[in-house]
Amino acid sequence: GTVVTIGWYYIPVLKENLYELIPAFVLSFLATWIVSRFTEKPENIEEAFIEFEK
């Protein structure tokens, strides 16, 4: 998000057309979603949640 915001700010063509926070949010969301899709959840995560609730 930060890299997109800084890059967007310093490229005049992009800065004139769209506020930099919007693409930064979208690309950050996509990066988070893609990483979560390609990584496996820990096997004992359900046990950790149950233990935490006690």
Image (cartoon, rainbow, N blue to C red):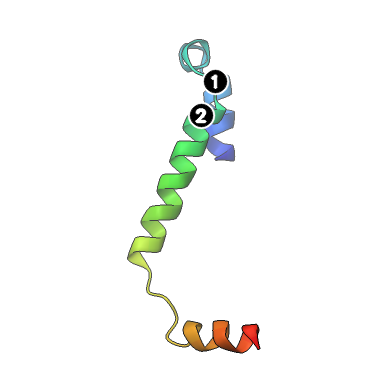
Q: Quadrant of the N terminus?
A: top right
Q: Hey, which residue is sitting farthest front in the picture?
A: 54
Secondary-structure class at tag 2: helix
Which residue is pictured at 43% across the width and 49% down the height? 31
Where in the figure is residue 20, as x and y percent of width and height? 54, 25
Q: In the figure, is residue 34 to the left or right of 11?
A: left
* Secondary-structure class at tag 1: loop
Image quadrant in which you'd find residue 5: top right
Question: Where in the figure is residue 49, as x and y percent of width and height?
Answer: 56, 82
Quarter of the image for the C terminus: give it.
bottom right
C-alpha span from label 1 to label 2: 6 Å
Q: Residue at x 42, y 86 (%)?
A: 43
Q: Amino acid at mark 1?
A: Tyr
Residue 9 vs 42, above or below: the answer is above
Quick one: 21 or 46, which is closer to the camera? Answer: 46
- Which x, y percent locates residue 15? 53, 16
Q: Which residue is mark 1?
A: 19
**The label number, if any, that marks residue 22 in the structure image:** 2
Q: Are marks 1 and 2 in contact (CB under 8 Å)?
A: yes
Query: Which numbered dot is residue 7?
Result: none
Determine whether, in the image, residue 30 is placed left or right of residue 25: left
In depth, the one of 29 and 46 nearer the eye is 46
Three-letter code, disc 2: Ile
Identify which residue, 49 or 24, lies in the foreground: 49
Please say if 18 is above or below 27.
above
> Is 35 rendered above or below residue 5?
below
